[in-house]
Amino acid sequence: MKILAGVYPHGSYEGSITMGGTELRFVEKSIRQAIEAGIAIVYQELTLVSNMTVGENIYLGKEPLKNGVINWNKLYSQTQKLLETYKLDIAPHALIRQVGVGKKQMAEIAKALSEDARILILDEPTSALTEDEVDKLMAILENLKSHGVTCIYISHKLEEFFRITDRVTVMRDGRIVATEDTKNLTLEKTVGLMVGREMKERFPPSTRTPGEVVFEVKDLHATDPFSASREVLKGVDFDLRKGEILGIAGLMGSGRTETVTTLFGEYGTITQGHILMHGKELHIHSAREAMNHGISLVPEDRKAQGLVLLQSVLENIALPNMDKFSSFMRINKNAQIKESQKYATSLAIKTPSLLANINSLSGGNQQKVVISKWLMTEPQVLILDDPTRGIDVGAKYEIYKLMNRLAAEGMSIIMISSELEEVLGMSDRIVVMCEGRSNGILERSEATQERIMALATGIVEKNGTRS
């Protein structure tokens, strides 16, 4: 993907790229050369300027000028025409920070198409979208196809391939494993190609039996730290047992992430309710206080919130644990390497060295680094917010096995997931969030996708009655 987009220039790789029978060599200003050749990319981590409008973002750096100044009328009329041509439902004057993730994704696509792209690369475009937004994206891609735009669609949500693609190429460990017409593939065959073996089950079996209650949240209310008048949590109740995986499900905006980041002391201002560990009330105002009480959080966005991208694997793993390796204002480097290597080996992190830059690792291995650094804090409660987002099937399975092992060893785990199958496959019980409150708790034996969605949408209230 980065080679095709000119991020890695010609000379840094072997082989050739041809387009329309002509070899492409991106050397100087290689990213601009790729764009001029008709290749555009929409990255998983969106690259928009939040305080600018949709139109300003689309034409950033290439604004139409009149007498040396920006011609705003032309900029917005061109934006409107572009959005109408590709049926992108977003207003040209809308501020990026005021629109949802789905609209931002549309703005990114429009930005790419404004360069007259003939090849559009989309990297995990649905990783943060709702089902409704996914449907809209699929319709947009069909429309692009009808306009002659070729799309390379990268995703770990395999069912999407069967909705949108003509052919599927499977890669593993930097190599092409197979390219097949989509009509000749099944979900099981695709998974087998990805992991290099037949996978009869998506989720590893577990025989754990959760023990006594170790953590409780009672009637938790909290306000937005940036707007005290906006209540983001409106009554969250649940308990967590020793050796249990407690799933949290709900629609985007239901308060899932707001709940766990508030428990970790890094988001909402608590106005009501109680947090208890082993029956003792906790007052948490920062991540350091949460860590001191035995709570760790693997955040939703690993690159923005979980990693220091300019540092090495070693530095990232050790970062929250420096007190273990320092004394008298000196760091014991040998102890730091020894302890970090133990976790890197235990979690099977694929890296040439602990000194390798974290950016050189795949998404799955980056996620293992984030998990490693929090496991090193030896938490009693481990919170995982969408832990398998944007990673491949094989890496997902490894993380599932790790979660089962940790729970079997007595660790208590809270897992948020946007994928209902994952919540159902990994959880002992499931808390369902709706509009900032916990709308019900389902035992694994009684949980179904239909029951979760009924609670998540508010069709069924907490007491089981229909609204």
Image (cartoon, grey):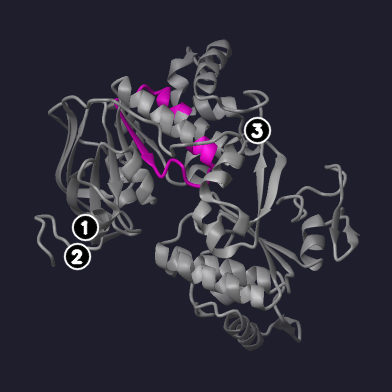
Residue 48 location (% of width, % of height):
57, 63
Neighbour class for label 3 at 10 Å: few (<14), some, many (≥20)? Answer: some
* Percent position of residue 125, x then y: 55, 59
129, 445: nearer the viewer? 445
Amino acid type of the residue tagged 1 in the rendering? Leu
Instruction: For marks 1 and 3, give the CA distance.
Output: 43 Å
The residue indicated by pointer 1 is 455
Q: Work out whether residue 116 or residue 394 is closer to the camera in this orientation and state it.
A: 394
The range drawn in magenta is 372-396
Q: Nearer the viewer, mark 1 or mark 3?
A: 1
Farthest residue, direction front: 184
Q: Does residue 96 show up?
A: no
Q: In this rendering, is residue 13 above or below 154?
A: above
| Secondary-structure class at tag 1 | helix
Q: Quadrant of the C terminus?
A: bottom left
- Circles 1 and 2, Cβ within 8 Å, touching? The answer is yes
Quadrant of res 442: top left
Q: Which mark is residue 459?
A: 2
Magenta includes 337? no
* Neighbourhood count class around disc 1 (C-alpha, 10 Å): few under 14, some 14–19, many 20 upward: many
For image coordinates 61% across by 30% down, the residue present is 312
Looking at the image, residue 191 sits to the left or right of residue 172; the answer is: left
Let me know if residue 374 is in the magenta part.
yes
Disc sitting over residue 357 in the figure: 3
First in residue order: circle 2 vs circle 3: 3
Distance CA(mark 1)–CA(mark 2)? 6 Å
Residue type pointed to by label 2: Ile
Percent position (x, y) of residue 197? 57, 33
Q: In the rendering, at what x and y percent does residue 445 appear? A: 21, 41
Q: Amino acid at mark 3?
A: Asn
Q: Please, what secondary structure does the residue beneath circle 2 have?
A: loop
